[in-house]
Amino acid sequence: MNRLVGWLVTSDTHVFHYVNQQMRCRAFDYILPKLTHLGGATSTISSLLLIMLLSGEIVRSWAIQALISLTVSHIIVHFIKKAYCRERPYRKLENVNLSSSPLKDYSFPSGHTTAAFSIVIVFSMYSLALAILLLPLAVLIGFSRMYLGLHFPTDCIIGALIGTLSSVLVVYSSSVFF
């Protein structure tokens, strides 16, 4: 078990350094600091509220489910961050390109990635066209968190899993109860 954990930590660090240092380019430097905010609380909640106000009944129900999924996943992330207390890469590693303001909370799991997937998966379960459009966006939000020096790859992977499981749970429970 110790060898597995050691391999995972080493791999996590190597992938982080590759994304954060080796993949640097002007396009990412320009786009990713803006794109990353799409997974933040202000953007996710306001987008869902706007969809709920402006959409028809069917899409409104998807947005409500996405809001429930977002809430459930946020609660899970909150408790995991408190229990696990993983330091952010820029606090733990040397030579990290930190492209935004340092954050004070813990790293694991990525809340932005979780939020993106908790919303995108709900809409993707109902529409293939939205899945094709939104899934790459959710992946890019997770990628941006590593590129900006804020999260390790496992933070983003587990965040994506939490968001996905939250969405699946909400969509399937909605179909059972309503």
Image: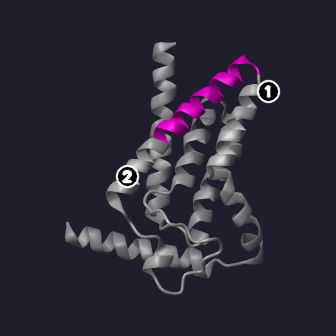
- The residue drawn where x is 46% and y is 77% is 91
Give the overall secondary structure of the magenta segment: helix
What span is colored magenta in the figure? 56-73
Establish if 174 lies above or below 72. above
In this figure, which residue is indicated by the disc labeled 1?
54
- Ranked by sequence position, the earlier of labels 2 and 1 is 1
Residue 120 found in image quarter: top right
- The residue drawn where x is 64% and y is 22% is 61
Q: Is residue 171 left or right of residue 63?
A: left
Q: Which mark is residue 25?
A: none
Establish if 176 lies above or below 46. above
- The residue drawn where x is 70% and y is 25% is 59
Place of residue 171 in the rendered image (x, y in percent of width and height, measured from the top left): 52, 27
Q: Are marks 2 and 1 in contact (CB under 8 Å)?
A: no
Q: Residue furthest left?
A: 1
Place of residue 11 in the rendered image (x, y in percent of width and height, measured from the top left): 40, 73
In this figure, which residue is indicated by the disc labeled 2?
80
- The residue drawn where x is 68% and y is 35% is 48
Place of residue 109 in the rendered image (x, y in percent of width and height, measured from the top left): 45, 56
